[in-house]
Image (spheres, rainbow, N blue to C red):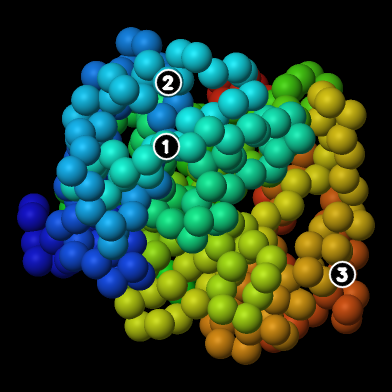
Amino acid sequence: MDTQLDRVIGVLRQSEFRIAADRHVPSLWIKKLTSKAKALCRRTARSPVPLLFVVDFEEQSAGSDVLCDPTPLLAIQSTLSSDQKLVAIIDREGRLLRTTIQTWDEAANWEMPWAAQVSEDCQAFVLAVYGRSLSLFDSGRLRDQIDDVNRPRYPHVSVSDRHVPAREFPAAVRRHFDDKVQYERGLAFWGDRARREFVGGPERVFQKDLWFYLQEYLLDQRRVDMEYSPAGLSDRTDIYIETVNDEQYLLEIKWLGKTVTGGSYDEEQAKRGARQTIEYLERIPSITRAALVLYDGRKDDMEIAWDSSHQHPKLDLSLRLYIVSKTASEIGRRSS
């Protein structure tokens, strides 16, 4: 049933409205640019080429609309080497202002996507197109990501029992773990399941999927940002939640165990994560609550030996999530 609450929640979830509010520009500008970028994704899906658009809301151009017809950009792109990247600066209508070419070493900069770095350097709104995928960055923060523009974003048309107020985000984290992570549904993090070894960089896999989930299922969220630096903090928090009532929540994400690439983290990593989160809380007193989320892939299911240096009245340390290495079908056969 389409209720007034459902419609309000739908509006609050739309990243275009949040970006427009932060940039103090009409939301229609953002929505039109995003719609054009989605159409571009569909046209270039068969021959995916990375296209990056930096939006200048002040300057206006008499040039061609390269979101509607990227032919001039594709011609330039075809002449570049593998470590060269094309950046198109466009106006609020999608018309080309100018282009620049940058050198980017993916191996040396694997922690931050190229589009995020450009957005941060320019403190700009950026549209990143690749195949059917569209990402929206604003001042270095990933504000939205659509993996496939042909798929509907939110299949739920009404509030379900999975929707909770933001203050109950630990319950949403646990539900995400039970629904998706525990049996590796819709995300891939085991590099070698039999040896209990994660893929390289598993934290990013957990972080991104949880970020999507919280955007959908936190009822009163105004924004759910990934890799965000709140005022007063130079570091990037893994997930930052802000509600319509101006409550603020932080989630710090860590993984424990081993990877197929030789990485290894034990209990000390969890304790470092707790101390790091406490530092955030002390530097930003306005944070309502924080949590350390531990995705535990160690061989043995062991509790963390916390001490007083890891405790804070606003810090939740209960979210240690132990991942089984058996598949759902294996567990089903064993219990039957």
> Does residue 299 sit above or below 266 in this rendering?
above
Q: Secondary structure at mark 1?
A: strand
Tell me which residue sits at (70%, 76%) in the image.
280
- Amino acid marked by disc 2: Ile
In this rendering, would 163 be left or right of 92? Answer: right
Query: In this orientation, which residue lies closer to the viewer: 136 or 333?
Result: 136
Where does the image place residue 169, in percent across and percent down from the top left? Answer: 49, 65
Q: Position of residue 199 (x, y in %)?
A: 73, 28
- Look at 68% across and 30% down and name the residue there: 106
Q: In this view of the protein, which residue sits in the foreground, 318 or 68?
A: 68
Mark number displayed over residue 174: none
State the SS at label 2: helix
Of residues 231 and 333, the one nearer the viewer is: 231
Circle 2 Cα neighbour tier, 10 Å, few/some/many (<14 / 14–19 / ≥20): few
Q: Nearer the viewer, mark 2 or mark 3?
A: 2
**Type of amino acid under label 3:** Trp
Residue occupied by mark 3: 306
Disc on the earlier residue, 1 or 3: 1
Mark 3 element type: loop
Marks 2/3 in contact by CB < 8 Å: the verdict is no
User: Distance between the Cα atoms at labels 2 and 1?
Assistant: 9 Å
Q: Could you tell me if the residues under marks 2 and 1 are in contact, i.e. CB atoms within 8 Å?
A: yes
- Residue under numbered circle 2: 76
Decide if residue 210 is in sight here. Answer: yes
Report the residue at 37% width, 19% height from top: 74
Marks 2 and 1, the one that precedes in the sequence? 2
**Circles 1 and 3 in contact, beta carbons < 8 Å:** no
Where does the C terminus fall, quadrant-wise?
Answer: top right
Instruction: Quote the CA–CA distance across marks 2 and 3.
Output: 56 Å
The residue indicated by pointer 1 is: 99
Q: Tell me which residue sits at (45%, 26%) in the image.
A: 50
Q: Give the CA separation, mark 1 to mark 3.
A: 53 Å
